[in-house]
Image: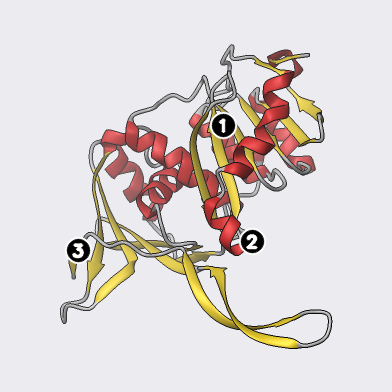
Amino acid sequence: MLCLPFMNPGIQQIDVVRVAAQTGVPVIDHTAAEEPLELRLGGEPFVVIMRTPGADRDLAAGFLLSEQIVRVGPEISAMRYCTDEDGRDSPNVLSVWLNGDAALRAQHAMSGRRHVASNSACGVCGRRSIDDLMSGARRVDAAMTVARVVIDSLPHTLRAAQDTFERTGGLHAAGLFDRQGTLIRVAEDVGRHNAVDKVIGASVMAGDMPMSDRALFVSGRTSFEIVQKAVVAGIPIVAAVSAPSSLAVELAREAGVTLLGFVRAGGFNIYAGQERVLL
């Protein structure tokens, strides 16, 4: 296969019947795109991720970081979309070439691994324990602190940056913020985990590592996998509009991550790492 650059829209137009008070009217609406992305390592299939097209390179970098295959951006030597030999575009096939120790880690990860699909609701599929996830990852010991007024501002700031959600109403978002509450990066996707991978992956590709002075804010609930991705990236503060799961709380406490939930309406819950929050 030949590999060439390709851009794919994250929004699709569809025909719907909009039912109002008295009747149904045919209209053109917008929906968030969800398509499979086959990720290949060195030409070999690695995983299929159901995602919203766009920022696929960031998604791949973030996913490979969370899998602890890539640790820094320069370990990724190239990423290209593919085309079939007859010239037809394959925008849903992304090949990644790694170098150095990352190439060795990829060989180890792929040995005996079957080709699997990861749906848009799935994070680190197949992992079974905190010990497994923490293998090779360090505790997050960053000294970053953040004021309550900054935490209170995060939902509005992230919502204002959700351009695709504004048109479709069907996407999650993740944002990386500094200690002053400035939005550094934002990503949207049908999957919360994908949105997190995209913002983290963008930082990996930009050389913005480690992320010890960043806070991660997500638009939905906080799962075990989202906290795990923050741990691997070295992000000390994770916050969300909704609730964390019990295992997310357990992992945050074990890994030294500050975990906040129900951040809305001028209040929030602190589930772990209260010392980083200036009340």
Marks 3 and 2, the one that precedes in the sequence = 3
Q: x%, y% of residue 144? A: 59, 14
Residue placed under numbered mark 1 in the picture = 231
Any mark on residue 188, and which? none
Three-letter amino acid code of the residue under disc 2: Gly
* Left or right of residue 188: residue 101: left
Any mark on residue 3, and which? 3
Three-letter amino acid code of the residue under disc 1: Val
> Does residue 15 appear in this view?
yes
Foreground label between 3 and 2 = 2
> Does residue 136 appear in this view?
no
Q: x%, y% of residue 172? A: 61, 53
Please identify the quarter of the rendering in which residue 209 is found.
top left
Please identify the quarter of the rendering in which residue 201 is found.
top left
Marks 1 and 2, the one that precedes in the sequence = 2
Please identify the quarter of the rendering in which residue 182 is found.
top right
At mark 2, the secondary structure is: loop
Q: CA gap, disc 1 to disc 2?
A: 29 Å
Question: How is colour applied across the structure in the image?
Answer: secondary structure
* Left or right of residue 85: residue 92: right
Residue drawn at the location 33% of the way across and 66% of the way down: 93
Foreground label between 3 and 1 = 3
Q: x%, y% of residue 160? A: 60, 43
At mark 1, the secondary structure is: helix
Residue drawn at the location 69% of the way across and 45% of the way down: 223
Residue placed under numbered mark 2 in the picture = 169
Residue drawn at the location 22% of the way across and 78% of the way down: 88
Three-letter amino acid code of the residue under disc 3: Cys
